[in-house]
Image (cartoon, rainbow, N blue to C red):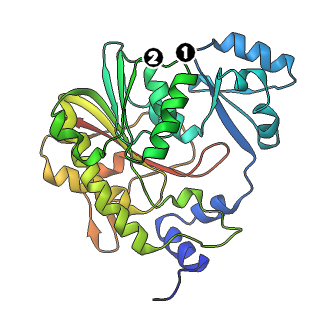
């Protein structure tokens, strides 16, 4: 089998949206970070950063998230707020997805594929308890250290395979977040060409994702909501996985995602001969722009 090329990737992405490849190829101008409310406050962090010469711009939909020019990233990691774990560098797409999960103070939230832990940290600021599951042992211990340094005391960690969590915790959690392992197309550096990407990789991850989304849904309480997300563009890993869930569970319903972002695409209703449930139009694909990376997300209600 011939090795995949950059042209193969471009042709596939152009089928999804011809804007994706040019945006993926464009130089990154900004990056984002979030204030860690477990350790500090927005006002305190901004005061320190301005004293150290930074001028971050607040994100309109999240008062705890900010952007800076990409050339400031190296110096930001040397700043006192960063070294004291008062801020957390995190992509805006991940922040947006985590804040899109509606969480009440009494909730127990499951983060099913949690490492490196940035979304769990957001949940820890809003929920009573968080369970963070990560199967990879090395990533798991880095995540635990991350939580400890961030003063997140309400996160329970589990070095477990997320595919089987539902067997121990059926209909247990008030809300669930699954940022599934994926082919990571949004992280491809097109300047370096194709290294690890292939359509075979897409199909391999799609099989895993279907197992994980079942576990996530089975772990969710009736009446609860979950978010399924990936950092890839492939419909086989996105709409097809959510459509698989909708066909398997009649009580699974898509919830429209509220946003005012100007660089999103509604979920596809068909792909290469496969037809999807019409409600998939209410899922979104975030295009890589500014401090946002490429991302797909669907909000799903149980019952």
The image quarter in which residue 41 lies: top right
Circle 2 sits on which residue? 153
Q: Position of residue 8 (x, y in %)?
A: 54, 79
Count of labels in the image? 2
Q: Position of residue 85 (x, y in %)?
A: 65, 23
Q: Nearer the viewer, mark 2 or mark 1?
A: 2
Query: Tag 2: Cα neighbours inside 10 Å, few (<14), some, or many (≥20)?
Result: some
| Residue 277 seen in the figure | no
| Residue at screen point 79% across, 20% down | 49
The quadrant the N terminus occupies is bottom left
Q: Which mark is residue 38?
A: 1
Q: Position of residue 65 (x, y in %)?
A: 62, 27
| Residue 150 seen in the figure | yes
CB under 8 Å between discs 2 and 1: yes
Helix, strand or loop for disc 2: loop
The image quarter in which residue 25 lies: bottom right
Q: Position of residue 169 (x, y in %)?
A: 18, 32
**Nearest the eye: 38 or 176:** 38
């Amino acid at each position: 089998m011939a090795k995949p090329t950059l042209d193969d990737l471009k042709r596939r992405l152009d089928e999804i949206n011809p804007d994706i490849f040019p945006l993926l190829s464009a130089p990154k101008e900004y990056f984002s970070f979030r204030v860690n409310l477990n350790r500090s406050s927005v006002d305190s962090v901004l005061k320190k950063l301005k004293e150290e010469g930074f001028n971050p711009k607040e994100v309109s939909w999240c008062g705890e998230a900010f952007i800076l020019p990409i050339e400031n990233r190296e110096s930001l990691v040397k700043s006192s707020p960063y070294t004291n774990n008062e801020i957390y560098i995190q992509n805006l797409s991940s922040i947006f997805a985590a804040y899109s999960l509606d969480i009440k103070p009494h909730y127990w939230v499951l983060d099913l594929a949690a490492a490196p832990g940035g979304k769990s940290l957001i949940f820890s600021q809003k929920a009573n308890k968080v369970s963070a599951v990560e199967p990879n042992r090395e990533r798991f211990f880095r995540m635990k250290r991350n939580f400890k340094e961030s003063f997140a005391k309400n996160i329970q960690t589990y070095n477990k395979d997320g595919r089987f969590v539902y067997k121990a915790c059926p209909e247990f959690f008030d809300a669930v977040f699954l940022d599934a392992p994926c082919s990571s197309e949004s992280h491809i550096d097109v300047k370096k060409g194709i290294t690890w990407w292939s359509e075979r990789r897409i199909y391999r991850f799609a099989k895993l994702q279907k197992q994980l989304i079942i576990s996530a849904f089975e772990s969710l309480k009736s009446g609860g909501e979950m978010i399924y997300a990936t950092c890839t563009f492939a419909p086989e890993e996105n709409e097809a996985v959510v459509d698989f869930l909708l066909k398997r569970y009649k009580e699974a319903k898509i919830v429209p995602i509220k946003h005012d972002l100007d660089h999103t695409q509604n979920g596809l209703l068909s792909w290469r001969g496969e037809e999807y449930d019409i409600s998939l139009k209410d899922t979104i694909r975030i295009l890589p722009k500014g401090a946002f990376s490429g991302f797909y997300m669907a909000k799903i209600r149980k019952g």
